[in-house]
Image: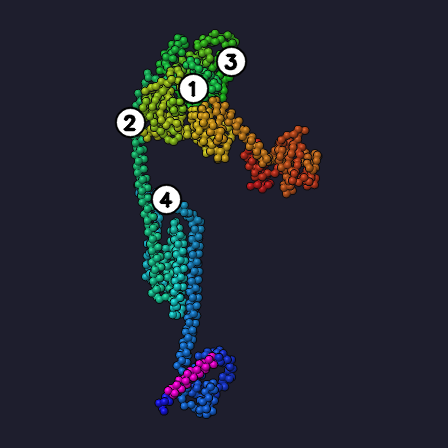
Amino acid sequence: HNIATMPKKKSKQKKQASAADDDDWGALLEVEGAAPAAADVPKEEAAADPEPKEEAAAPAPAAAAASGQDAAAAFLASMGGAGGDDGGGGGGAAAKKKKKKKKKGGGGGGEEKKDEKVSAKGRLIAERMRKQQEEEERIRALEEAEAKRIAEIEAAEAAEAKRIADEKERKKQKQKEKIERQKREGTYMTKAQKAKAAQARQRLEAMQAAGMLPLDALQEKKKKPVYGNKKKQEEEEEAKPVEVQKEEPKVAEPEPEPKKEEPKEEEEAQKKDGDDDDESGDNWDDESSGDEWDASSDDGSDAGAKKKVDLLAERLRQASTGNLDSDDDEDLVEAEKRREKERLRQLGLQRAERERIEEEKRQKMLLEQEEANRQEMMAAQKRDEGRKKREEQEKVNLAARSRDDLRCPIVVIMGHVDTGKTKLLDKIRKTNVQGGEAGGITQQIGATFFEKKTLETQTARLNETEKFDINVPGMLVIDTPGHESFTNLRSRGSSLCDVAILVVDLMHGLEQQTIESLTMLRSRGTPFVVALNKVDRCYAWKTCADIPIREALKEQPDGTMSEFRTRTTDAKVQLAEQGVNSNLYWEMGDDDWMNSDFVPLVPTSAVTGEGVQDILLLLCQMAQRKLWKQIMWCANLQCTVLEVKQIDGLGTTVDVLLVNGHLREGDKAVFCTLNGPIVTEIRGLLTPPPSREMRIKADYIHHKEVKGALGVKLIGNNLEKVMAGTPVMIVGPDDEEEDIKAEVMSDLSKVQDKLSTDKKGVMVQASTLGALEALLQFLREETKPPIPVSSVGIGAITKRDVTQISIMNEKGCPEYATILAFDVNVEREARDHANDMSVRIFTADIIYHLFDQFTRFMENLAEKRRADAAAVAVFPSICRILPQHIFNQKDPIIVGMEVVEGILKVGTPLCIPALGGLHVGKVISIECNGREQETAKKGASIAVKIVNESNPNIMYGRQFDATHSLYSTLTRASIDALKTNFKDKLENDDWRLVVKLKKVFNII
């Protein structure tokens, strides 16, 4: 039976255990439901509990202090208070459900023999909920500590940022004060000034190293920056990390257990801080670079980088105290220090490399300078040696001169235009050069050589009575232009000659260019003879061809002789007015014209030939008796460029006047140009036939060698830019070429200004360099205002020349797109191209015709510009209304006026500044004495018609009256138009009025 009932008991126990578990869950749910209500129970009811449980004594205060008790605490309290009740009614809610236990309790009067047990599942749930609560409290504490730590870190970072900003501001202010102090003391230098000072110091050091300066030239040594200071300071700071920590304020922070998500945030913050530090490091580099590095080093900026590294390390240590281990923190700081050290090391290496390269360049420059100085010294030494040898040889040649060996005297013929200079030479040469010249005037300088045989033949009849032996080998006569523009050629001829012929028109006396030539000759001390030409123009002159003048005068009637004496006396008086004593040569004794300042007068006729023999013989006598020391031949080369010409078949040739010495074909000749000396080989020596003009194209005679004095045409390469009037020298076997070059270029300063050009201007093209110089002189000195010249050339005009000058159209100067061509040909292709490029070409064979053409063009252009600017330009004027002459008060206003100041023109707008600039109207017409006129000047009384299109209702007597003066309405544009186009139309008083009106109208 017992065995049969065993399974039943077991199943019954299982049912009781499951029922107990159900009761436990029910009790737990019931307590959770009652937990919110427990918070609302008054304190009086809680205090009325007769016997508090001992087991609940510990959690009871916590439950009373809290606002409510959670489910786990209520459950544990209820489970622990079951065995402590003394009465049968103390079972609580569990006793109600377990009726059997209530009955055993005896109505609550006795004690229970054993405590009710809590199930294992309930204890597990309670333990789990307790741990969850503890975890929540721990997490809450961690969050509060972390928030506090982050707030402290942000506050520290903000304080650090403010401190760094204050430090930068302090440094900037200190630097600014330093600069101001240096400016006051006068020691401040900009970067450019420092660079110049450094370069000067380097040059001084280089000169001292080369021994060119004494040691005391560099007394003040510049302090060089020491690049090892930064690294040394870094090592000292690393050795004292504790001191750095003491300097920074400490922040007490909790050390909670790090979370997994925190390191990422800290790494991002560190990375951001590192970027900021890099940027600050870059800024430090920028501030410390260049010339200001030295200045910043004075303020302690050498330790700036180390200080920034320490601050960065401190910030990283503070930011990672709660989340990273000390080893990780140390690694980050060390890594940042290493990076900063590496960056500084790289900067130091780069600076050292730059200094090394600069030092190499400086050394190389010094070596090159030394080598150049050495070469220059050697060249100068060679030049000096060559010059000494040349001067010694010249002294030997001068000592070897002899009176028995005379050269040809050089004679220049000068005078006013159309006095018969060329015609006189034609009579001697028996040529007609004058008839072949354009306009019958000479426009080039030329030379004619007369042989001794020619001179003897020409003077044979006169020499029968004079009995004079001609010993000179010939005579070289230079013909110069007489036109006023060829002053340069007359000056060049007068500077080369030994004796001169001043041709004076007997009918006109001394003229402008005659006086100019006379002044040139007297300034140079050149002896001269006056030829009173055109004696055949005297009334009833009886022609006696080619005989001496005294014989011709004997044949003339008394009336003719009377006129001759009168005109001769007038010429002598005019010469005396210029300070020249003169007399007829046959009335002078030998002592008069040999030993005194008397100038002989020789009457001549270039047409019939009277007196030509006299002047030739007189020149020979002067050369042999008075100038024999000057015309002794010398082996020293004396050669001067007369002209540079373009000749068909020969190219560019140079006409030279060989005074002394020899010229040989194949010699190495040195010429002077604007671009420096040129050395070329003489490929040909050409001379015209005897008694023929050099400038006239003829069958030239080729020579292997020529002897001075003679006019020679040289053929060679690269002669286009040779300067006329400069010397020509030959490099001999014992000469130094550099010495010869320097000697040739020594006189360049006298002629280089003649061919200078401007950036904007016309192009000038001429057949010879002398004519080109004359053109340039006219354009710059004779024209008002001067005309600028941008390009010059010699020879025919080509398409390339047209293209070159067409650039002036693009530069906004179309009036300068002009070519002035004197005595040159214009290629057909160039003329067609000029029409396409809007380039004007003016050509003429006579120089003053070219002047007239261009002057006329400029006047027409100026008139056109004035017409275009007339609508803008306003002439200054102040007018006063005459109250007794009011003809019409309104639309139009016709009144009488007096011009108080300035010029009143038709079209001038008038206003009254006293009435706030009231616009009265524009002048439509001006009448004076019943006649209309365009202008009225100061002091004129006129009737003026004024129309105001913008305000036709303006009326005299209402808006204004005779008490108000009328002013011209000036503007900045109108003043500019006056300056540009009407400058010559206004006088000084008018310009002063313009300045006055500028103040009235507030024009800047």
Q: Report the front residue among 666 and 185.
A: 666
Q: Which residue is mark 3?
A: 566
Magenta stretch contains residue 9: yes
Q: Is residue 880 above or below residue 828?
A: below
User: Looking at the picture, which amino acid does disc 3 mark?
Assistant: Thr
508 relative position to 936: left or right? left
Where on the picture, by quarter, is residue 423?
Answer: top left
Residue type at mark 1: give it: Asp
Q: Which mark is residue 134?
A: none
Q: Can the viewer see residue 67?
A: yes
Do the CB atoms of the residues marked 4 and 1 lie less than 8 Å apart? no
Gap between marks 3 and 1, in whole Å? Answer: 29 Å
- Mark closest to the chain's N terminus, 3 or 4: 4
Q: Which residue is mark 2?
A: 734
Instruction: Of the two numbered discs 2 and 4 on the same chain, state the one appearing first in sequence.
Output: 4
What segment carries the magenta color?
7-32
Residue at mark 1 = 479
Is 98 located above or below residue 780 in the figure?
below
